[in-house]
Image (cartoon, helix red, strand yellow):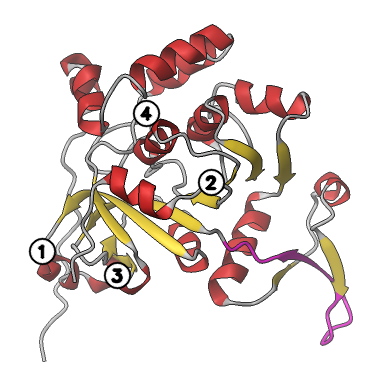
Amino acid sequence: MSKLTSLSDAIQKFVHDGDLLYAAGFTHLIPFAAGHEIIRQKRRNLTLARATPDLIYDQMVAAGCARKVIFSYMGNPGVGSLRIVRSELEAGRLEWEEYSHFGMISRLQAGATGVPFMPMNPTAAGDLERANPNYRSLTDPYSGQPVVVVPALKPDVAIVHVQRCDAEGNAHIWGIIGEQKEAAFAASRVILTAEEIVDPNIIRSDPNRTLIPGMIVDAVCHVPFCSHPSYTQGYYDRDNTFYLQWDEISKTTEGVKNYLDEWVFGVQDRQEYWDKLGDSVHQRLKVASRPSALIDYGQY
């Protein structure tokens, strides 16, 4: 059964005030378009969870969407701090929990598999363990050695961007594989955004690449260029220029307000946003073709 819908309708139906939201994607496939739509619809009191908040959560916090962030590593990649999130944390206006990358993924893994917590080997993150009471130690009943445990993370809604999927939500992802699968299986509701919607036969032709099955997906949204200023492997490059620009924009409240007014509230959807970026940006972010070698799965 087709789950195709507009991004606007998907956010309206599946993202509610007060939700714990996980916007997945590590380095690439970050669903910026969904974050912008949440800002447009003025969702409030969200708990925003992400392994790396990136600019998407800086913008959502700036727009007043969040009451809390749950994260591992917070920064504008390669540039410095996320100015908005950091200033809100330091001012005491934003609740927070911090984990290591492995701690965050372990929480999602516990949520995805339906167990209450996930054990980890003791880490060198002593300061994190002291600052975050959700890190706890137990005795391994088999070896008698200490193990660190973290609680399951079960988002109300996960938003996952993929290269391609069919109308039922069976999705292919390639390039850097992050926490997309774990976030989707851990969440109560799943919104997929996709660069392409393809025939189911294309998905079935490469079953090992199907990271997310349609049976756990609630909405499928065709959103080309969803990840900008991040990138989608094989479709467009990372816009490093904008990451540098955001560092300047986010220095002042006026700069952030002007950006949101022009690039979020001032456009209707992602297509209008992409068109507004202009041809010079489009050309700069083009990527050359580099296809994977053909695999013959055989027939029997």
Q: Give amino acid for label 3.
A: Gly
In the image, 16 versus 66, the foreground residue is 16
Q: Which residue was labeled with disc 3?
A: 214
**Mark 4 crowdedness (10 Å alpha carbons): few <14, some 14-19, many ≥20:** many
Q: Which residues are magenta?
A: 139-154
Q: Give residue 229's mark.
A: 4
Q: Give residue 199's mark.
A: 1
Q: Give residue 119's mark.
A: none
Image coordinates of residue 247 in percent, x first then y, are: 53, 15
Identify the residue at image location x=26%, y=32%. 269
Quadrant hosting residue 32: top left
Asked if residue 187 lies in the magenta stretch, the reply is no
Q: Is residue 181 visible?
A: no
In the image, 277 versus 143, the foreground residue is 277
Q: Which residue was labeled with disc 2?
A: 17
Q: Give amino acid for label 2.
A: Asp
Q: CA distance from mark 2 to mark 3?
A: 26 Å
In the picture shown, does residue 262 fall above or below 120? above
Disc 3 to disc 4: CB gap under 8 Å: no
